[in-house]
Image (spheres, grey):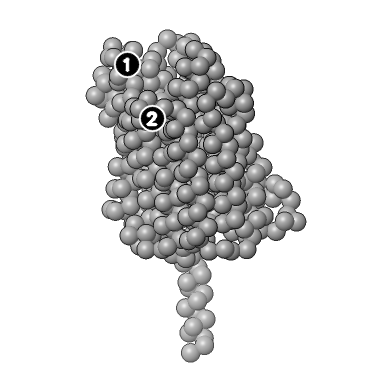
């Protein structure tokens, strides 16, 4: 990780992203409190919170391609400034709920091309694949740690300073991001061609078997998040207080941070790529343990293990970005992110419906784990085949190189 931090451009991206994520966590809590206090409506609170996810569906498929058609540094700066203005408007006291919801929607819509540009630029910075992978480890650990802190103290901070000031702070983080990126990122030309078809990236990704397998492994997260949507029913079924809901929500990201650290420090990059399928299967497989109706302590251990093995997603994301052509990387990232968001939303919704139908949140989580294993095993077999083919091709090329060198001599 120190090698990644030695690169000035990456430090700028990492800092800009980290402080922005912290502000976003604060803003999400502030919005939920603000809307519920003003409306006393659980429906409105849920709608506004859902609007922090839904725009990714449209923006991820369409607007992410802007990261290939325009210079990425400029796109990140412009998007950050637009978001700063919009969140600043949200901070105005007395803002109408309908206008607030519209602003939330647009802020998240603008975030799609910004994230695509950020991810694509991060891959451009590094020429060494191993150092790039370490940089993604650091990003994953940082963002999940900040999410944990947000779960732990976001509510207390918002109550202390007020919702308007919390939103104002989030707006300020976007300004800081724009300044840092503009000052320390290189100004590179657009990577793609403006004359390319709008969904060329989608056609390329789905036309590549290895990319389809990576997408499958990425979208398994839709089943891993089922326990998050059922945290309150799980606590009730265990017979513990509502305070345990926060612990159940924090167990997975805590495990993710630990898993990412261990993989980064003790597993070689090439071995991590080989273990992707095994870890993916493990991340959903441990959820089957909920069929035993565990107590709180065992449930937290199972969720932490799911998070720890789920750190494989960093390797998948880095490999996906590396294999995507630079000129299509923004659009390709948008496809992966959109699918992941859809998988998360559908997974949580179906998990809630099944739990309501069968009357047990624990059994529902176990069924989600079983379904995940049934999907992960074929994907793991396919991934192993892709790895064998890659090694065979690499060996064949090495043999040709040696023969050519021998002939020359």
Answer with the quarter of the image where residue 191 lies. Answer: bottom right
Residue under label 1, please give it.
Answer: 242
Label disc, if present, on residue 161 of the rendered structure = 2
Residue 37 placement, left or right of 334 = left
Q: Secondary structure at mark 2?
A: helix
Dot label at residue 221: none
In the rendered structure, are the residues bearing label 1 and label 2 in contact, judged by CB atoms less than 8 Å apart?
no
| Residue 382 drawn at (x, y percent) | 50, 45
Residue 8 lies, in percent from the top left, at: 42, 62
Residue at (74% x, 51% y) in the render: 197
Front residue of 284/114: it is 114
In primary-sequence order, the first of circles 1 and 2 is 2
Looking at the rendered image, the quarter that the N terminus falls into is bottom left
Residue at the (59%, 59%) spot, across then down: 326
Which residue occupies the foreground of this view, 260 or 274?
260
333 up-or-down from 228: above or below? below
Secondary structure beneath label 1 = loop
């Amino acid at each position: 990780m120190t090698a990644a931090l030695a690169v000035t451009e990456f430090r700028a991206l990492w800092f800009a992203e980290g402080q922005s994520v912290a502000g976003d966590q604060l803003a999400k809590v502030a919005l939920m409190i603000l809307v519920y206090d003003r409306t006393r409506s659980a429906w409105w609170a849920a709608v506004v919170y859902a609007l922090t996810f839904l725009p990714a569906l449209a923006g991820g498929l369409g607007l992410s391609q802007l990261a290939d058609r325009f210079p990425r540094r400029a796109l990140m700066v412009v998007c950050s400034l637009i978001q700063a203005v919009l969140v600043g408007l949200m901070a105005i006291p007395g803002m109408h709920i309908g206008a607030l919801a519209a602003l939330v929607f647009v802020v998240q819509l603008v975030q799609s091309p910004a994230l695509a540009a950020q991810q694509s630029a991060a891959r451009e910075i590094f020429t060494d694949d191993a150092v790039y992978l370490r940089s993604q480890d650091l990003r994953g650990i940082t963002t999940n740690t900040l999410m944990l802190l947000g779960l732990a103290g976001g509510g207390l901070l918002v109550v202390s300073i007020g919702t308007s000031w919390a939103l104002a702070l989030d707006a300020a983080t976007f300004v800081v991001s724009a300044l840092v990126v503009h000052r320390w990122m290189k100004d590179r030309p657009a990577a793609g061609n403006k004359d390319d078809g709008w969904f060329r990236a989608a056609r390329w990704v789905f036309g590549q078997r290895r990319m389809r397998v990576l997408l499958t492994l990425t979208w398994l997260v839709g089943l891993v998040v089922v326990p998050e949507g059922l945290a309150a029913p799980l606590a009730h079924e265990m017979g513990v207080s509502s305070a345990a809901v926060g612990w159940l929500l924090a167990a997975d990201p805590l495990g993710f941070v630990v898993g990412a650290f261990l993989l980064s420090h003790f597993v070689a990059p090439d071995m991590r790529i080989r273990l992707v399928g095994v870890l993916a299967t493990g991340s959903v497989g441990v959820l089957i343990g909920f069929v035993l109706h565990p107590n709180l302590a065992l449930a937290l251990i199972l969720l932490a293990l799911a998070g720890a093995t789920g750190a494989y997603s960093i390797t998948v994301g880095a490999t996906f970005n590396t294999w995507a052509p630079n000129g299509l990387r923004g659009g390709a990232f948008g496809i992966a992110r959109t699918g992941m968001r859809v998988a998360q939303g559908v997974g949580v919704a179906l998990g809630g419906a099944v739990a309501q139908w069968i009357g047990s949140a624990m059994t529902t989580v176990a069924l989600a784990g079983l379904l995940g294993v049934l999907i992960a095993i074929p994907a793991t077999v396919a991934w192993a085949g892709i790895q064998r083919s890659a090694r065979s091709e690499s060996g064949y090329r090495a043999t040709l190189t040696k023969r050519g060198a021998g002939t020359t001599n």
